[in-house]
């Protein structure tokens, strides 16, 4: 199913865009939806797809196709009647909107089974993030290499964060070690922490913590299944 032509931006579309206004910042809802579109588009590109319709995006994201068209048309003319959206072009445009164009460096903490899986995966690289350093407190793991990145001792943290311009710290460490690592990241100037541990982290207001928990995601999905 192809997309209708994209009309000029309206007041309603401006609201959908999240009220960018003077600060050029998206609403949380729009940012979350654009991120989901981007995830599907990147996977479609890896599958060799050149175009995709809003209806197909709706099927993969479970977001209404009308909402998808409104979200995207709020930022320009991306769709074409009878063709849909060009995957490569839309990936680039959404990355610009989300300010994620280019490359962003990550430091990964924990070289255990989870850390090794993260280091060997394309999950971050597909979205323009590059793991530039892996740290672990276990001397037996220091010097090992995962995903082409050597494991370093924690003592190197501050110097590497500053030299490599690390913007995100990913914690794949035991819960009892997570707060200490988070404190060191904050001290080194990192403003975004992605937390795979079960520890509740205490950080300053200017630092953002995103906690990833498969159990929470499953509970969320189960709620809608049972409702």
Image: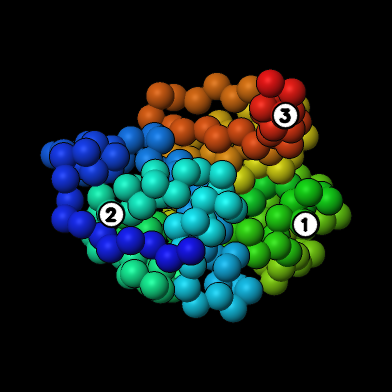
In the image shown, does 129 or 31 lie closer to the viewer? 31
Callout 1: SS: helix
The residue at 59%/53% (across/down) is 60
* Residue 116 badge: 1
Q: Residues within 10 Å of mark 3 (few under 14, many from 20)?
A: few
Residue 67 visible, this angle: yes
Is residue 199 depicted above or below 145 in this figure? above
Residue 161 visible, this angle: no
* Residue 225 badge: 3
* Residue 94 badge: none
Is residue 72 rendered to the left or right of residue 10? right
Mark 1 touches mark 3? (CB < 8 Å): no
Sequence-wise first label, 1 or 3: 1
The residue at 39%/34% (across/down) is 28
- Which of discs 1 and 3 lies nearer the camera? The answer is 3
Q: Locate the C terminus by quadrant.
A: top right
Q: CA distance from mark 1 to mark 2?
A: 40 Å
Q: Residues within 10 Å of mark 2 (few under 14, many from 20)?
A: many
* Residue 73 badge: 2
Is residue 162 rendered to the left or right of residue 62? left
Q: Quadrant of residue 11?
A: top left
Q: Position of residue 103 (x, y in %)?
A: 44, 65
Sequence-wise first label, 1 or 2: 2
Q: CA distance from mark 3 to mark 2?
A: 32 Å
Q: Position of residue 102 (x, y in %)?
A: 39, 66
In the image shown, does 58 or 102 lie closer to the viewer? 58
The residue at 49%/56% (across/down) is 55
How was the colour assigned to the protein in this rendering? Answer: rainbow
Is residue 37 rendered to the left or right of residue 225? left
């Amino acid at each position: 199913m192809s997309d209708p032509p994209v009309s000029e931006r309206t007041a309603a579309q401006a609201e959908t865009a999240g009220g960018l206004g003077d600060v050029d910042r998206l609403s949380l809802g729009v940012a979350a939806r654009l991120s989901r579109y981007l995830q599907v588009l990147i996977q479609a590109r890896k599958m060799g797809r050149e175009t995709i319709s809003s209806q197909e995006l709706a099927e993969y994201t479970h977001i209404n196709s009308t909402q998808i068209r409104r979200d995207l048309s709020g930022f320009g003319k991306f769709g074409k009647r009878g063709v849909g959206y060009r995957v490569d072009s839309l990936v680039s445009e959404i990355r610009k909107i989300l300010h994620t164009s280019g490359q962003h460096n990550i430091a990964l903490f924990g070289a255990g089974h989870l850390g090794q899986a993260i280091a060997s995966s394309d999950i971050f690289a597909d979205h323009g993030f590059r793991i530039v350093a892996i740290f672990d407190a276990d001397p037996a793991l220091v010097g090992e290499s995962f995903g082409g990145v050597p494991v370093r001792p924690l003592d190197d943290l501050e110097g590497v964060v500053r030299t490599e311009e690390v913007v995100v710290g990913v914690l794949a460490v035991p819960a009892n070690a997570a707060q200490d690592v988070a404190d060191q990241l904050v001290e080194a100037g990192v403003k975004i922490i992605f937390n795979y541990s079960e520890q509740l982290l205490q950080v300053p207001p200017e630092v953002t913590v995103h906690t990833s928990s498969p159990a929470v995601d499953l509970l969320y999905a189960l709620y809608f299944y049972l409702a």
